[in-house]
Image (cartoon, rainbow, N blue to C red):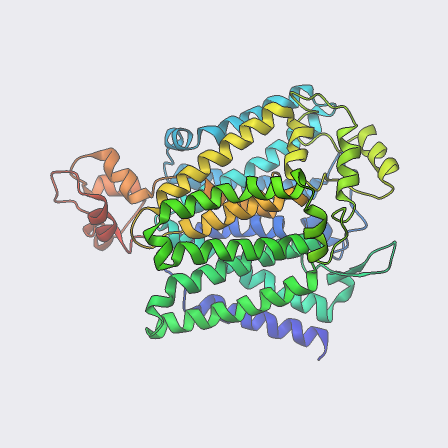
Amino acid sequence: MPPILALTIWFVLLVALLLFDPAKDSRVSSALWVPVMWMFIVATRNPAQWLNGGQLKIVAGSMEEGNPLDRAVFMVLIILAIGILVSRTFRWDDFVTHNTTLVMFILFALVSVLWSDFPLVAIKRWSRDLGNYLMVLVVVSDRCQLEAIRTVFRRLFYLFIPLSIILIKYYPQIGVTYWEWTGETLYEGLATSKNVLGAVCMVGALFFFWDVQTRWVDRKVPRTKKIIAVNLAFLGMALWLLYRANSATSRACLAIGCLVIMALHSKWGKRHITLVKTLVFASFPVAVVLAFGLDLSGEFARSLGRNPTLTDRTQLWKILLSMHTNPFIGSGYDSFWLGDRFLQVWHKFGEVINEAHNGYLEVYLNLGLIGLLILVAFLIASYRGIGKRLAASGPSFAPLAMALWTVMLFYNVTEAAFRFHWMWITFLLGAIFVPERPVRELQRIGKEVTPADARQLYGAHTSKEISRLPAARKELPDSKSVKRQTRGIT
């Protein structure tokens, strides 16, 4: 098949799927396209790279200066996200109250700019990375929080997964590269590396697997049957890409995430939810002790078809720890891989590299022990928050959020993802807690909801939409009543 024909067929099918998707929910806001565009860039390549034909070898601008086009695109998306949150009268005090440790981590990262060797570069990167949190807030502050998360994931994977297959099969000059030392074929698709391709497909497979599990009870309903069919088709494509990416870390994390989802959706898991949460929490420290304390990481690597040094990662970690950065405050936000240190690591390791291939070590190098401890506090706080949501009745994103939380811990053992990374922003979708808008806003009012109140809270609505609100009630309605009466408001 000619490449242009394959690309045309993909585009036609994509438009048809977006228009007639059986899982499409009209209640979600059109503003979700802003985080979709942001996350698509994070998962793929920067705008400057796409204008360069998708090539990664040629980077416009130095590592210190970045690229003005990329900065302009990120700035526009950040401004749009802020505008969306302002139009929703987003309660920042609620966000800070429920996500204190995350706010501390963000603020400490900002303060660390002061001791960076490249403060201007550090503040630029901090400002860019702030967009990750804003985009997540746009999604989770939507009136239909669960469906908003589902919609964002679906749109992303509808774009990413089939187009990556097209690029690998028909445009190998973009979707395939070769390792300069051995000539090994590396399948990258839309991503910047095989590991990122593996990470995106791993999250995609987890999402579609979770969605099938969630909807399986209603599988005989015609609409649900179509949704499950679409899920299975994309699950198959995601698994094929994951196989081609040959990312051992992502394959292992997919297995772990699926086990968590199955356990939480099983009858036994629902009856013993506390035990499941405890096992999930304990799994990571136990695995770390077995892998590094008892030196079993080499055997595990061999079982995944890798060498005992985790593809030379252990050698890299020794080199990085010998760099003698400030152990308490690090080298400054995202500043370690700049200047002389960058060149020294290249010289000692003998290969071009710009990450520690360990998320915890990466945070330590940039933010020191203080930053690492704050991050650990956020991980623990997010685990507790997700655990509370697991106990709630009704449809919930919590099982997938717990799977992503678990996967994030393991993924960062061999990859650095606590930064401007696909895994970080998808993890934040489940880790950041914001009360759903209808319930939060009505509880804040605590009085009769008049049409004027409705316009102030929800924007301009028709009289029919306003009539669905509990305008005649004199007392505060309960949460289930609010959700029932506000359903359908967009």
Q: In the picture provided, is 422 more to the left or to the right than 247? A: left
| Residue at point 67%, 50% (across, down) | 47
Residue 192 appears in the picture as rendered: no
Q: In the picture provided, is 94 more to the left or to the right than 487? A: right
Q: Nearer the viewer, residue 278 or 436?
A: 278
Q: Give x and y (percent) for residue 216.
A: 38, 67
Residue 265 appears in the picture as rendered: yes
| Residue at point 66%, 41% (across, down) | 294
Q: Nearer the viewer, residue 359 or 9?
A: 359
| Residue at point 23%, 53% (across, down) | 484
Instruction: Locate residue 289: give its quadrant.
Output: top right
Q: Give x and y (percent) for residue 210.
A: 45, 59
Q: Give x and y (percent) for residue 195.
A: 68, 53
Q: In the picture provided, is 286 more to the left or to the right than 213? A: right
Query: From the image, which quarter does the N terminus lie in?
Result: bottom right
In the rendered view, would you say 190 is above or below 414?
Answer: below
In the rendered view, would you say 419 is above or below 32?
Answer: above
